[in-house]
Amino acid sequence: MADINQKNYSNRFVNPYNFIHLPEKKAMAYGETDRHTGVIHYTITTKTPLFVPNSSSETAFKESDDTPDHKSYDFFSYTELDGKKRYEGKENYHVPVIPGSEMRGVVRNVYETLTDSCMGLLNEATYPVKRSPARFEHGLIYRDAERNYHLYKASSQAEGTSDNPQYEMPPAGYEKKYNGDMIKDAYLLKWGMGGAGKKKKKHYHLLSPQSEIKSVVLTHDMIKSKLSAIVSSYLDQPELKKKSKEKNKIAYEEYLEDLERFLASDSEGYFPVTYSMLRPGDQNVYLAPANYSKEISQYNLGTLSGEFAPCKNVYCPACDLFGHVGETGQGSKIRFSDLYVEEKKDAVDYYACDKITLEALGEPKLGNTDFYLTKPAGNATFWTYDYYVCGNRLKVAMGQIRGRKYYWHHQKVNMFKVKPDRLNKTIRPVRKGITFTGELYFEGISEKQLKQLVWIMNSGTEKLGLKLGGAKPLGYGSISCRVNSVEERTISIESNQLVYKLESKEYNAVNYENAEFSTTVKEEFYKIADLESISEDIEITYPKEIVQKNQAIEKGYQWFVGNHKNPKIGFPKKREDAYIVAALPGILDKDITMKYSESAYKDSKYNNKDGKGINMQRGSNQKCRNNDGNRRPSGKKHY
């Protein structure tokens, strides 16, 4: 039962996800030599609405006609949808099917966790990007005749604001008089937007090289990966898809195009950037296209994950069972069939509604280190993947990732209506209480591996749930699994004849302990997999702001802005003053709730005519925005 429902939590929420910590050491593949082949017959029952898309059409419903770039999907079925047709009304329902590949992914994730295996689906080449409180300095990357790269300090010889008619500047190499001096070979760094009134932003800088920073080591690949990741993080912002932001999008794209041309050239040349170092004399440097921007970590996810990065040569239990590629590649020992509805009824009766538009859901925001990283020991007040702040002093150290990401189960899913736009999606979900049947075929596995699979597929008997399909943060996709029967295939020679038998195998006595699962993660897994861990009276949501009493608006970026406000000085302007007010609670914390932030918004956009706060139906796409500030840099004509 829920363990945090004994108190009034009207002003608190539970974040949709949390993390199961990584053990001290990764397990190695088992050494058992016994072999078993057969099938597990099982069912899954939806505990909340479920959605798996039929990707044969991204415009299944009329919302895609009414709203430009709005995608809409029917539930997966064996029907190949016509992209020109709209599937609405009772005659346009299809019997839902769950692809076996969906179940395979869910089971593998759980199996990896419970066997202390690697994180096989980790995108280990990704470098986390985070908003930086530091002001970056002007710089120029110089490529010499031997294609070596050097970083130079640079000075801004000329600058312009958004109302300057000369804001569209000619390419570098031009000559222009500025304050009576002749400027030659100045390099243009242009922003995509500027402020207004007293807050006019500098819209461009013309940079000239000064002295070389000899401690910094630059390579072609490092320059490309750092700058591409920063600019791509801006381009990935859902806000940039709005027509009003098209100018910014074009400017970002120009910067990337010019970077590619610069790196592909063999001749000498300069490329304008901004840069920052944690300490004077560092070899590593943060590169960006603006004075106030983001910093990309020195470490990728593979390095941050240590030995739990995907296996390469020595394999873990999950890679041994599910298959792996590498020097000694191996196929999977198990196969999941598609799952079919158990009870035959009219197709329309399987669905929760004809269709519903969901709130926009963004990609994982690794830059939210207050959620994705463990707080360093001691009195740390701020932490990132590369450093932390303690006593207003910068400590350089690699961050510690929290572990494997899991979503809490919702006991009640509020299916609020949201206005379609280019950021969200319209879907047709299967309703709660629908049972599907499927088979898990195994070949040549040990009895230990079989027991482990049986326990996972029978975890619903312990009131534990798995998460399947899309929209998990909104509560969709909770399922309960139960095993109906296990059959083992045996082949023997009797009286000079080959005899093939299917024999029933007892599975009721299989439990977590005799399946020999990890003892270090059990308590955390049972907590977050429990279908009733969180009371239905407590809202499970991404962070958001209280606009007025009992009225919350999904403005997650504002929550994080407030969460990074230094209580002594306000918003920091250097790394040493950076601050994190509240970190994500651990799964096993006594109180796993967090507090909404409060604001005195009077903007008519968020208030109705009576002055009462508008409930955004927990479906606003506002939470997809992040704390980027107003300056969104990009470049043009850089060489």
Image (spheres, rainbow, N blue to C red):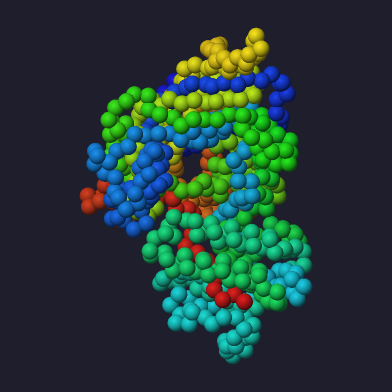
User: Does the rendering let one see residue 516?
Assistant: no
187 w.r.t. 248: above or below: below
User: Does the rendering let one see residue 636?
Assistant: yes
* Residue nearest the observer in this picture, 274 or 500: 500
Q: Is residue 32 left or right of residue 621?
A: right
Q: Position of residue 213 (x, y in %)?
A: 74, 68
Residue 434, quarter of the rendered image: top left
Quarter that holds the N terminus: top left
Residue shown at 44% from the left, 82% from the top = 165
Residue shown at 52% from the left, 46% from the top = 364
638 w.r.t. 5: above or below: below
Q: Position of residue 424 (x, y in %)?
A: 38, 49
Residue shown at 57% from the left, 14% from the top = 501
Q: Position of residue 153 (x, y in %)?
A: 69, 71
Quarter that holds the C terminus: bottom right
Give the residue at the far top of this rendering: 495
232 w.r.t. 392: above or below: below
Q: Is residue 70 left or right of residue 115?
A: left
* Residue nearest the observer in this picture, 201 or 622: 622
Residue shown at 32% from the left, 31% from the top = 350
515 w.r.t. 166: above or below: above
Q: Position of residue 525 (x, y in %)?
A: 55, 27
Give the residue at the far front of this rendering: 496
Q: Is residue 29 left or right of residue 489?
A: right
